[in-house]
Amino acid sequence: MPNESALGVFVPRQLARHCRAPGTPRARASVPAAMSEWLISLEGTGSGQRLAMILALLAAFLHAVFGSLQKARHDPWLSRGAIDACLVGVSFPLLFLVPWPEPHMWPIFVGVVIIHFLYKVLQAMAYSRGAFTVVYPVVRGTGPLFAVIGAWFLFGEVFTSVQWLGLGVLLSGIFGLAVYNLMFLVTDRETLVPALGLALGTGLFVALYTTYDAFGIRSAVDPFTFLVWFFFLSAFDFPMLFAFTPLRRRLSGIALRPLALRGLAGAFVAFGSFGSVMLATRLDKVGEAAVLRETSTVFAALTGWLVLRETVGPRRIALMTLIAAGAVIVEMGG
């Protein structure tokens, strides 16, 4: 299906395979060019759908790891700043390995920067006020429902009745997990109400960036051009906040080496997580990729248990099974 939308700046996939904007150079290295051509050749095929499913599940696992990196040990604001600083450094040399963005992509990148900045601020505020195992499921549970609606509005995607059933099963598991964690929460209860409000707001931005990023990567002739410039441009905000606002006071007394190592690890995880799901939305339906990614709540619970030393019991395991079952129903129902 052509990448058309009400915004009117999509490049049809068929056209993207054969043309580029005037003056746009070809890829400057054979390996990235070959990867782009291979990926584009899979669009609309059964192999592309299978790869999209694998990428969405990989994104789910990596996103849970990414969330725990931002929450664990360090202040979430510091963790996010360190991750973004490393993303700028890691992505900069990659800019020379991909074609230059087409002129119509620059306004899209402006939207990317704004949306992801607001998402990151809300996420850091939520993590600062609430327990990871309560906040994270609410964030991830709110996102897929609105992402499915957004995908219908922008891309004309329609879920079958079986897929809506699967989405309901998945959401019942996600929000059930949040309620269960809330019942037995012993820390951060005094800030719980604002944390849950921020988590809901963050979830709405998850849906917004999921559909908007899919819009962006489908608009680009070369998907890797979008990914590299996405990571480079959207990572300047938090380092600049620490450089020019009172947030820099949070660095006082902090051991910078462990923070930098956490930032570097987070940068590579972010490449895998956000990159995988955006490639999945280029290859297949946005709504399906968004739902499959929300199995990250299962991985988050396991991460909370293994890394953050939070408890996991049989009831939580049952709820996580619901989440996984819902994802399977959505995929099979399509």
Image (tube, rainbow, N blue to C red):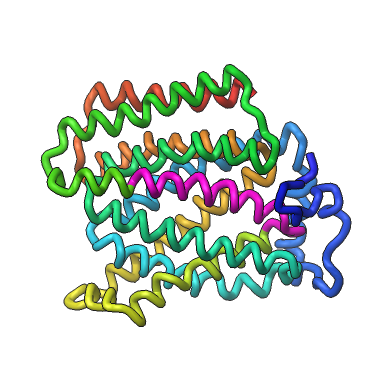
Q: In the image, what residue occupies the spot 30% across and 25% down?
A: 317
Q: Position of residue 209 (x, y in %)?
A: 53, 51
Screen quadrant of the C terminus: top right
Residue 153 figure quarter: top right
Q: Does the magenta segment cover residue 178?
A: no
Q: Is residue 42 above or below residue 124?
A: above
In the rendered structure, the answer to whether residue 142 lies left or right of residue 209 reads: left
Q: Is residue 307 visible?
A: no
Relative image position of residue 90 (x, y in whole percent): 51, 70
Q: Is residue 279 left or right of residue 172?
A: right
**Quarter of the rendering containing residue 186:** top left
The magenta-colored residue range is: 199-223
Vertical side of 195 occupied by 21: above or below: below
- Identify the main secondary structure in magenta: helix
x and y percentages locating residue 98 in the rendered image: 70, 68
The residue most toward the front is 6
Q: Is residue 161 visible?
A: yes
* Nearer-the-camera pick, 159 or 265: 159
Position of residue 264 in the picture relative to residue 58 (left or right): left
Q: Is residue 270 left or right of residue 8?
A: left
Q: Residue at x 59, y 34 (%)?
A: 288
Magenta region includes residue 212? yes
Residue sitting at 87 percent across and 60 percent down? 19
At 51% from the left and 42% from the top, the residue drawn is 58
> Depth check: 284 or 241 in front?
241
Closest to the observer: 307 or 130? 130
Whole-percent x, y for residue 303 in the image: 31, 42
Quarter in which the N terminus is drawn: top right
